[in-house]
Structures are given as C-alpha cells and as structure tokens.
Image: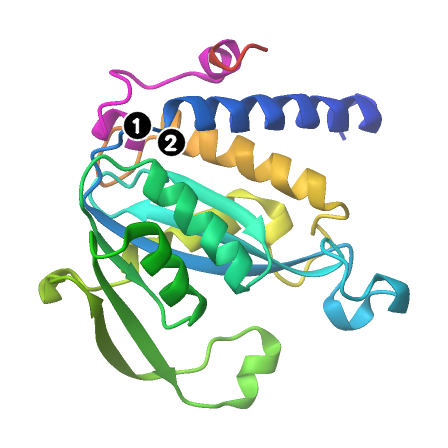
Amino acid sequence: MTGVSRVTILKLKQDLGNACAGYHNRTMWNLKCRHIQGDEIWQFCYAKEKNAAEEKHGTFGYGDVWTWVATDADTKLVPSFMVGNRDVATARHFIDDLASRLAFRIQLITDGHDAYLEAIENAFGCDVDYAMLIKIYGSTQEETRYSPAECIDCVVKPIAGDPDFDRIATSHIERQNLTMRMSMRRFTRLTNGFSKKIQNHAYALAIHYMHYNFCRIHKTLRVTPAMEADLTDHVWTIEEMLDKVGL
C-alpha cells in the first residue's frame, strides 16, 4: 500500500514507539491534574483467547489483552497508560505509575473492577478522593455480537477521602476509549486489523498517545491536551514530534 517494505515499516514503528515511550516517561512528571478517570479496554492479540493454540494459552500476548488508561477530565491529558492483563498485578503497576506522575491530591474515578481497590490503597493511601461508578447492565443476546447491553442503573460507591459527587463520572474516559478505537485500526472490532505481536501493540499505543497529547487539537478545548496542561505552548507538527523524541 505504501510502496515501502513491510520490514522497514515495522522497524520504524519499533524505533518510534520506543522513542515516544521514552519521551513520555521523561516528561510526564509533576502534573497538576486534579480530576482523573481510569478504565481498562479489551482487545486481543495474535488470536482471540478461544482460538489461540493450546500451547499459547496463559502466555501474555496470545489472546486477551487489556489497555489501562487514565485521563484528566479537565485537560483531557493522558498521563498514564499500560498494556497488560486485567488483574491485580497490572492494576498495581498502572496505579503506581499514575500516582508517581501527579503533583497534587486528586479525585480519582474508576469502574467497579476490584483490582483497583488494593492498587489505589497501596499507591495513594489516604491521600486521594476515590470513588467507583458501578454500571449495572441488563443481559441481552446482543452482547455476543459486540453490542453493549443496556445500562439499567448506576451505583456510586465512595471508597476513600471526600469525593465530589457532582464530578463522579466516567464519561471522559469512555470517550477516550472511543478515540482509541477510532484512531488505531488494531482496536477496531470485527476486522483483521488486530495486533499479531504484543510488542507492535505496545509501540502503536506509545505513538498514538504521543500524537494525542501533543499534536492532536481537542475539539472541545481547541488546543492540544499538552497545551491545556501547560506542558507546551503550541501545537506540535509530526516533524516536531519526531525531532523531540530524537528521530
């Protein structure tokens, strides 16, 4: 499609993905975020869990893969993201990473996934205003066809500190999930564009969030998330992004 060797493109993706991840880790510190929403989004790599070869079952990168993302509801910045399983170990790594990047006490909202409870207590202790927003869905046959079941109720569950009930929502992170699916073909459902190797999956995420934070103008803010968060004073071009990461 591009007239360039597939091997060359994959090598470029590896180099750029590593460079973007490195830049993110060097610069996303002492962030002045106040209202964070977190979630985990499902995708599969190599093959669906049920279709993976028997000898691959239980090996990370073959079957279900989860991308954990945190977004600032005010600036729309994504300070932390991680690829892993949907388990306590990954939750702890993700929340530890998020907590280390923040300058102030925050209000944190997640869904009702139990893995967050231990992870957030270990990372923040009492220094967080944390609540879960638990959505209750009705069961329908459409669920097996990738259509979401109808949400019939929401339960707010304060966990720590004194969360502002008027700001307990997951709408921003859910919109962030949609942005991810629409921006990266490997997240598009019912196609063959899924990642075949977990390494390429991670490289694509690093590139996407570098571009999202620094180059992509948010339609509501009319600036990039990085500009709104005072990390830069202008919209980056692709050329500037490549220069910043050293490519």
> Looking at the picture, which amino acid does disc 1 mark?
Ala
Magenta stretch encompasses residue 238: yes
The part of the chain drawn in magenta is 224-243
Residue 89, placed above or below residue 23 = below
Residue at which label 2 appears = 213
Give the image location of residue 8, x and y in percent. Answer: 79, 21
> Looking at the picture, which amino acid does disc 2 mark?
Asn
Give the image location of residue 114, x and y in percent. Answer: 42, 72
| Tag 1 secondary structure | helix
Tell me the residue at 27%/55% (across/down). Answer: 125
Q: Is residue 150 left or right of residue 17?
A: left
Query: Callout 1: few (<14), some (14-19), or many (20+) C-alpha neighbours within 10 Å?
Result: many
| Tag 2 secondary structure | helix
Q: CA distance from mark 1 to mark 2?
A: 5 Å
How many marks are shown on the rendered structure? 2
Residue at which label 1 appears = 226
Residues at badges 1 and 2 in contact (C-beta under 8 Å)? Answer: yes
